[in-house]
Amino acid sequence: MARASKVIGTALAAIGLAVAVMFSVVMSRDEGYQKAALAAARNPGNVMYEAEFGAAKVRRGFQLVGVIAGILLALNGTTLVGLGMVASRVDHTHA
């Protein structure tokens, strides 16, 4: 059980970090958000630009949820690795 927890935990941590980094890169390269923010700032009160910026904010929110989900998945993975370490120590002391 200790080894399985460590292996699964390492895999989950790696996948979680990859997901978090991927969504972070997507957020940083999102030119549509930058353009929509700039257009809304230059044209206050224009409904079309405000609607485009609102859609960009929603998209940014989903990207942020992806980053947070990746971080939480990595946290679960590290918790499993820690559990595997504790389980291996318990197995060695009782053997």
Image (cartoon, rainbow, N blue to C red):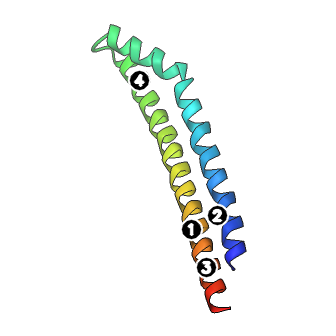
Q: Amino acid at mark 4?
A: Phe
Determine whether label 3 and label 4 are within 8 Å by CB: no
Instruction: Report whether 30 appears left or right of 40.
Output: right
Of the two numbered discs 3 and 1 in the rendering, the one whose residue sits closer to the viewer: 3
**Which is more N-terminal, label 1 or label 3?**
1
Instruction: Report whether 3 appears left or right of 69.
Output: right
Badge 1 density bin: few <14, some 14–19, many ≥20, Cα 10 Å:
some
Label 3 sits on residue: 89
Label 4 sits on residue: 53
Of the two numbered discs 1 and 2 in the rendering, the one whose residue sits closer to the viewer: 1
Residue 78: where, in percent of width, then height? Answer: 57, 61
**Which is more N-terminal, label 4 or label 2?**
2
Instruction: Report whether 10 appears left or right of 30.
Output: right
Cα gap from disc 3 to disc 4, whole angstroms = 54 Å
Cα gap from disc 1 to disc 4, whole angstroms = 43 Å
Q: Amino acid at mark 3?
A: Arg
Secondary element under disc 2, as helix, strand or loop, is helix
**Which is more N-terminal, label 2 or label 1?**
2
Secondary element under disc 4, as helix, strand or loop, is helix
Residue 80: where, in percent of width, then height? Answer: 59, 68
Secondary element under disc 1, as helix, strand or loop, is helix
Of the two numbered discs 2 and 4 in the rendering, the one whose residue sits closer to the viewer: 2
Residue 76: where, in percent of width, then height? Answer: 55, 62
Up the image or down, 39 lies above or below 86; here it is: above
Determine whether label 3 and label 1 are within 8 Å by CB: no
Q: Amino acid at mark 2?
A: Gly
Label 2 sits on residue: 9
> Which quarter of the image is occupied by the C terminus?
bottom right
